[in-house]
Image: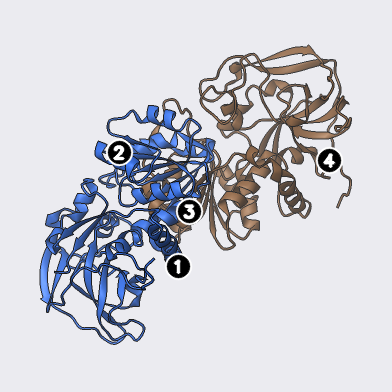
Chain colours: A brown, B blue
Amino acid sequence: MNTSNRPTDLPAFQIPDENRRVLLARRPLGIPQPDDFAIETAPRPSPTPGTFLIRNIYLSADPAQRGWASAEANYSEPVAIGGPMRGLTVGIVVDSMDPEVSVGEFLYGLFDWQDFAVADRSKILMRLRKPLPLQVCTNLLGINGLTAYLALTELGRPQSGETLLVSTAAGAVGGFVGQIGRLLGCRTIGLTGDDAKVERCRTRYGYAEAFNYKTADLNAVLNDAAPQGIDVYFDNTGGPILDTALRHMARGGRIVQCGTASTASWNPVPTGPRNEREVLTRRLVWSGFIVFDYLDRFEQAADRLAEWYLDGKIVSDEDISEGIEHAPGAIASLYAGKNVGKKLIYIGR
Amino acid sequence: MNTSNRPTDLPAFQIPDENRRVLLARRPLGIPQPDDFAIETAPRPSPTPGTFLIRNIYLSADPAQRGWASAEANYSEPVAIGGPMRGLTVGIVVDSMDPEVSVGEFLYGLFDWQDFAVADRSKILMRLRKPLPLQVCTNLLGINGLTAYLALTELGRPQSGETLLVSTAAGAVGGFVGQIGRLLGCRTIGLTGDDAKVERCRTRYGYAEAFNYKTADLNAVLNDAAPQGIDVYFDNTGGPILDTALRHMARGGRIVQCGTASTASWNPVPTGPRNEREVLTRRLVWSGFIVFDYLDRFEQAADRLAEWYLDGKIVSDEDISEGIEHAPGAIASLYAGKNVGKKLIYIGR
């Protein structure tokens, strides 16, 4: 085990004079498309007292950015038109006027989709001090792994021997949920949208069973795969998959609502079968999860995830594009299910 | 305070030779109607070893009986056609071949809609040993009061100063929920379906505010009455009231699904706006409650409720019809909202 307290196998990066920024050019209708963004170049900024300058190395593309870019009611203020796209990144501190933040530190945080950010400590989600590859720090120890671990353990509360169903089971969160569920002793069932991902669920993420919800009869599949009912449903999709899963929940089952990826637009609100009777008669507990509510748990969760990784018990997959020009299309690509593993954009140059 | 361990102000009752029974004559379509039942007379039965004979005094009419009489998937086996209607009652033991059950004991349990039942201890929900009127034992200390107390405290978990919304706020459960919420320090808002009940919510159950959801603009009303959002929604109705309430929940709010009275039929499942995004973005916890899951908590809950009653802090309202001939129409009457307080049928004669 590497006992260094720095990320390993760092990619090359330079400190150019210019700051390329991915701006939100207009308010997206539904899922942000490449044309909703513009890339502009500005001079490299300098830190002011109490702030630091970070050189971003990886930009993270996350489903949550759709909500951040939207003007619909959400859990955070919408990104301003003409402003830099809000985004998570991993970078290295290259200048600092904050005595608590040192040049050379690797940080994970909300530094937005740009080469450089002047930021204060409120933007830091985690200081990266684990001897793991930087791309793994951005994924397993970033919001994907943290979401999987914290949502599953805090809201799903799986017990050993229980049945865990996961939608987008091969996705950047779902792949971790399946692995963590298995490590916690669950029988894991994965749902995903293509046959290659079904195979990946079984062979790489250790799901006991996996199905293509687009081609399978989901009702029949769940009857067979979970005859005693589903104890925990980790839902990243919402929509008709959720409606079916609800009707296969065991008494006292927990539904973790972690995403609603299957619904392209919430304006107007789409309709579906009423689910309150299922909540009542099955005594479900259906909870919503936003990872940023659990900032004070990140370190502890990351410790456990890093331990599993270093022990070879969990794999972390990243799908890396090189060049900031890939950022504008990255969110649409996520929603199209094109990535295999966590979508990252390397901008180190 | 009366320190006797028997219910007070007992009504008169006789021990006739015949046993009148309310049978389920056919499978109801939706809400059970009077013609779905038949009243038949049989000889009074006698206990067998390990059982006792109870003389029912009050029959309880409960919304849950609709589900019990239905063949739709539910949380319990449907009542058999031609069998006695499953129902809660309060009665007195008049003969016993169980050494643990004494003649003269007052019991609350699933003794069905009939004059006499031969039963074993598995049918007892509670032995009535509180010095409260028998009708109050059947209501406040029965599943109505127990549901209100246990669902609110176990799933709603209200904190002092929080805002509690209650649907069917003047109903047999809702009236207690409002009173208990106020006793726990909540600001209580009641929704009900007619103006007389609105007045009753305010003057008798202590709601801070109450509204007629049929005539008010519910969105506007909740904007005004809960500008910071609803922390706990105790839902007895489901349907459009639930959909609106969901969109006024505070972050981290709890929804207690205790009933779905607003939906007349679940076959086919009606549609409504999709709610998973509200669960997610508001970080709601939406839970289903069935009181029979909490049998081991009944005594403790009843102790607290009885204490409040004896201290004059909570009122218990019963709507009593005299004569078993009122039983067949009692469930339909509940769903029509005709009762004021808990619907009981006195069959003591």
Determine whether label 3 and label 2 are within 8 Å by CB.
Answer: no
Q: Are marks 1 and 4 on the same chain?
A: no
Residue assigned mark 2: B198
The alpha-carbon separation of the residues under discs 3 and 1 comes to 15 Å
Residue B270, how many percent across, how many down? 31, 41
Residue assigned mark 4: A7
- The foreground one among A300 and B5 is B5
> Disc 4 is attached to a residue of which chain?
A
The alpha-carbon separation of the residues under discs 4 and 3 comes to 47 Å
Residue at 51 percent of width and 36 percent of height: B250
Q: Please indicate whether residue B169 sits to the left or right of residue A185 in the image.
A: left
> Disc 2 is attached to a residue of which chain?
B
Q: Are marks 3 and 2 on the same chain?
A: yes
Residue at the extreme front of the image, as rendered:
B1
The alpha-carbon separation of the residues under discs 1 and 4 comes to 53 Å
Residue at 80 percent of width and 41 percent of height: A133
> Disc 1 is attached to a residue of which chain?
B
Residue B296 tag number: 1
> Amino acid type of disc 1?
Asp
In the picture, the quarter occupied by the N terminus of chain B is bottom left
> Amino acid type of disc 2?
Val
Determine whether label 3 and label 1 are within 8 Å by CB.
Answer: no
Residue B176, how many percent across, how many down? 37, 51
Q: Please indicate whether residue B336 sits to the left or right of residue B261 in the image.
A: left
- The secondary structure type at the circle numbered 3 is helix
Residue assigned mark 3: B153
Determine whether label 1 and label 4 are within 8 Å by CB.
Answer: no
Residue B280, how many percent across, how many down? 52, 38
